[in-house]
Image (cartoon, rainbow, N blue to C red):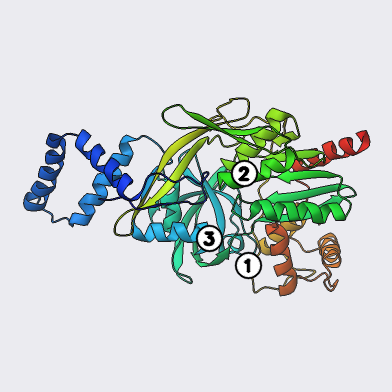
């Protein structure tokens, strides 16, 4: 089977391995080195199964099994085999839009885990939140399944259903959710001024356009008076190495950004240019900040050009390349490793923050179901859910006793006024939709984000010290 040109995907590195005649030559040499006897054994086993096995098996299934077996030998959780359909879905996501449920995911403790959801997506509307464990997809367990394969199970044609079994990060009774897939456009970043002189940019991924968009956001916030930047990389699973290098280059003077090591031990170094933004920098990270996020955080930390705040990062220091095989299937294999500027390997350990701050353990409440109006005098579970949402968002309904009394009505009015709605104190459909948007907004500034609170505190100190 002849390898085609490798596809560069949103992983870490733009790298071209030998293709065409040279690639075919290496392929033939590799097969020859395996020995004629070994190749004949593979052929013999294939023919025996086809001729003698009680249950007929499609030849393509045997070939697929053989490829998976070779990848299993690598003992590398980042290597994977893709069917032609899985490969197509994977390539769609690399273009920044796809059909799915609108959630970023990672593998944690062997399970598929929600990192964050996108505003208005099926995942957000269903109440999925960071830390939720997806244990099954359409009845298939995600335990120890390759991340890319599990993602391919979730994606599919627009409007089709997918059934997820979900448990909260702190345990509890599993829930079964049926979500309809939708067209999802992956945002690159959000930007805002938190208070005078303190800007915040949340970068969601390291796509090809991320460095240009980040620089544009910095320029825009600077024009609005930003003097200190909080770069929020929480939940950012990574992306292109080239994008990571360009992002780090914005903040570093003439210095190493990352060292790339191949399997022969040869190392190359990506360097920044002399120009650097002279703005105090704080970088927020968490356990889901991975690969390219860790390259940026590691470079910032090693050169002391910013303060890293949050939790230890994911710990992925390997580089993968995706190849298309004949017939449309594909494989993803690890081709290189990387080290931080000071030569640190963060594989399995991650970047340890300069200032360690744990997340708030309180779960984000589930959005209210549409269709029911709530007002003064009502009581029940819906009212209790409303009270918990208002509390989470920083409004004070008094308690979550499930009774729609004066304090709940007053808290709802305050929320409505803050969002430009009619101050009725009644939960109508427009107010419900606005509550959902407020809950889903990444980095919601309600009480309960101690990591961001600490970053703002440090930013104030930097402003006072200038």
- Which residue in the protein does label 1 denote? 369
On the rendered structure, is 34 left or right of 191?
left
Dot 2 lies on which element?
A: helix
- Labels 1 and 3: the sequence-earlier one: 3
178 w.r.t. 252: above or below: below
Dot 3 lies on which element?
A: loop
Please identify, in this view, whether the residue under mark 2 or under mark 1 is nearer the observer. 2
Q: Quadrant of the C terminus?
A: top right
Q: Which residue is drawn at 23% across and 42% down?
A: 28
Q: Residue at x 51, y 63 (%)?
A: 98
Q: How crowded is mark 1: few (under 14 residues within 10 Å), some or many (20 or more)?
A: some
Residue 228, position as x, y percentages in the image: 84, 43
Please tell me in which quadrant of the rendered image residue 456 appears.
top right
C-alpha gap between disc 2 and disc 1: 40 Å
C-alpha gap between disc 2 and disc 3: 17 Å
Q: Residues within 10 Å of mark 3 (few under 14, many from 20)?
A: some
Disc 2 + disc 1, Cβ < 8 Å: no
Q: Is residue 144 visible?
A: no
- Which residue in the protein does label 2 denote? 244
Q: Is residue 291 visible?
A: yes
- Which residue in the protein does label 3 denote? 95
């Amino acid at each position: 089977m002849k390898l085609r040109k490798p596809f560069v995907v949103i992983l870490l590195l733009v790298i071209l391995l030998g293709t065409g005649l040279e690639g075919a030559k290496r392929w033939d040499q590799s097969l020859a080195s395996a020995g004629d006897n070994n190749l004949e054994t593979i052929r013999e086993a294939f023919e025996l199964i086809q001729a003698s096995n009680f249950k007929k098996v499609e030849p393509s299934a045997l070939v697929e099994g053989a490829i998976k077996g070779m990848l299993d030998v690598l003992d590398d959780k980042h290597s994977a085999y893709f069917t032609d359909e899985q490969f197509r879905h994977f390539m769609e996501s690399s273009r920044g839009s796809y059909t799915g449920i609108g959630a970023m995911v990672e593998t944690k403790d062997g399970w598929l885990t929600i990192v964050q959801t996108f505003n208005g997506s099926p995942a957000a509307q269903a109440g999925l939140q960071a830390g939720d464990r997806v244990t099954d997809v359409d009845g298939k367990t995600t335990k120890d399944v390759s991340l890319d394969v599990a993602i391919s199970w979730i994606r599919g044609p627009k409007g089709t259903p997918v059934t997820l079994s979900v448990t909260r990060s702190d345990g509890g009774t599993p829930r079964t959710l049926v979500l309809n897939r939708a067209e999802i456009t992956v945002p690159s970043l959000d930007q805002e001024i938190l208070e005078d002189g303190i800007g915040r940019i949340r970068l969601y991924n390291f796509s090809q356009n991320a460095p240009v968009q980040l620089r544009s956001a910095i320029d825009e916030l600077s024009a609005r008076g930003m003097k200190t930047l909080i770069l929020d990389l929480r939940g950012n699973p990574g992306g292109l190495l080239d994008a990571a290098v360009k992002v780090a280059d914005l903040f570093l003077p003439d210095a190493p950004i990352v060292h790339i090591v191949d399997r022969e031990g040869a190392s190359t170094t990506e360097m920044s240019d002399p120009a650097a933004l002279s703005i105090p920098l704080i970088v927020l990270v968490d356990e889901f900040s991975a690969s390219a996020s860790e390259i940026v955080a590691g470079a910032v930390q090693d050169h002391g050009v910013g303060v890293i705040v949050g939790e230890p990062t994911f710990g992925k220091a390997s580089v993968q390349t995706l190849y298309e095989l004949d017939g449309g299937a594909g494989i993803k294999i690890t081709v290189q490793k990387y080290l931080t500027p000071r030569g640190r390997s963060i594989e399995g350990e991650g970047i340890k923050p300069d200032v360690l701050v744990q997340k708030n353990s309180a779960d984000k409440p589930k959005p209210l179901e549409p269709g029911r109006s709530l007002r003064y005098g009502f009581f029940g579970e819906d009212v209790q859910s409303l009270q918990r949402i208002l509390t989470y968002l920083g409004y004070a309904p008094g308690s979550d006793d499930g009774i729609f009394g004066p304090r709940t009505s007053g808290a709802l009015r305050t929320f409505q006024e803050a969002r430009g709605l009619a101050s009725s104190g009644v939960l109508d459909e427009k107010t419900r939709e606005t509550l959902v948007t407020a809950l889903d907004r990444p980095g919601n500034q309600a009480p309960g984000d101690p990591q961001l609170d600490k970053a703002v505190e440090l930013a104030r100190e930097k402003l006072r010290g200038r």
